[in-house]
Image (cartoon, rainbow, N blue to C red):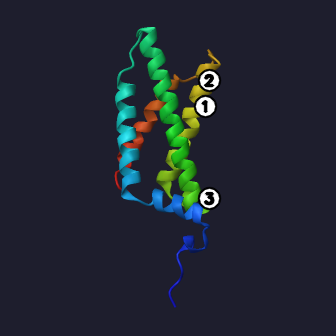
């Protein structure tokens, strides 16, 4: 007797999310977004014009939102336990939490934080290392 796949009892809306997250196109889109994120991070420099700083801040919010949605979709698709069994997913969630924390600290203009929030964003580059893992 063949065991049914874990998603076989999912409701239709969750099956759609599972199918999306499980597709190679989803991974390609996320990889492209990570690449764009790396490019925007490379554009930062000390004493950059205010307009560029605001534009890069907006892109940081956009990328962080995309990565939050990606993690949420994967948790919905795989289930909490199955999602967190994968070390790459654990890294993704840590990076998302650090990114959100960095945004909050930046917005609070915290002068006492021991690390520059830009360094936290650079950790997103680690996601490139995962390749097709």
| Mark 1 secondary-structure assignment | helix
Determine the CA span between mark 3 and mark 1.
Answer: 22 Å
In the image, residue 66 above or below residue 57: below
In the image, residue 117 above or below residue 81: above
Instruction: Classify 10 Å Cα crowding around label 3: few (below 14), some (14-19), many (20 and above).
Output: few
**What residue is rendered at 58% in x and 27% in y?**
103
Residues at discs 2 and 1 in contact (Cβ within 8 Å): yes
Instruction: Locate residue 57 relative to residue 37 in the image: left or right.
Output: right
Between residue 40 and residue 89, name the one nearer to us.
Answer: 40
Instruction: Locate residue 16 relative to residue 32 in the image: left or right.
Output: right
Determine the CA span between mark 2 and mark 1.
Answer: 6 Å
Q: Which residue is mark 3?
A: 80
Percent position (x, y) of residue 83? 55, 58
Q: Which residue is mark 2?
A: 105
Q: Which residue is mark 1?
A: 101
Q: Residue furthest front?
A: 12
Instruction: Classify 10 Å Cα crowding around label 2: few (below 14), some (14-19), many (20 and above).
Output: some
Percent position (x, y) of residue 59? 46, 27
């Amino acid at each position: 007797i063949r065991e049914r796949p874990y998603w076989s009892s999912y409701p239709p809306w969750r099956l759609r999310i599972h199918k999306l997250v499980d597709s190679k196109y989803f991974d390609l889109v996320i990889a492209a977004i990570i690449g764009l994120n790396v490019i925007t991070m490379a554009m930062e420099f000390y004493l950059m014009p205010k307009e560029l700083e605001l534009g890069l801040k907006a892109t940081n919010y956009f990328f962080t939102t995309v990565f939050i949605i990606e993690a949420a979709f994967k948790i919905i698709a795989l289930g909490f336990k199955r999602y967190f069994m994968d070390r790459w997913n654990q890294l993704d969630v840590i990076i998302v939490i650090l990114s959100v924390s960095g945004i909050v600290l930046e917005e609070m203009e915290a002068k006492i934080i021991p690390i520059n929030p830009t360094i936290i964003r650079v950790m997103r580059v680690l996601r490139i290392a995962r390749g097709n893992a």
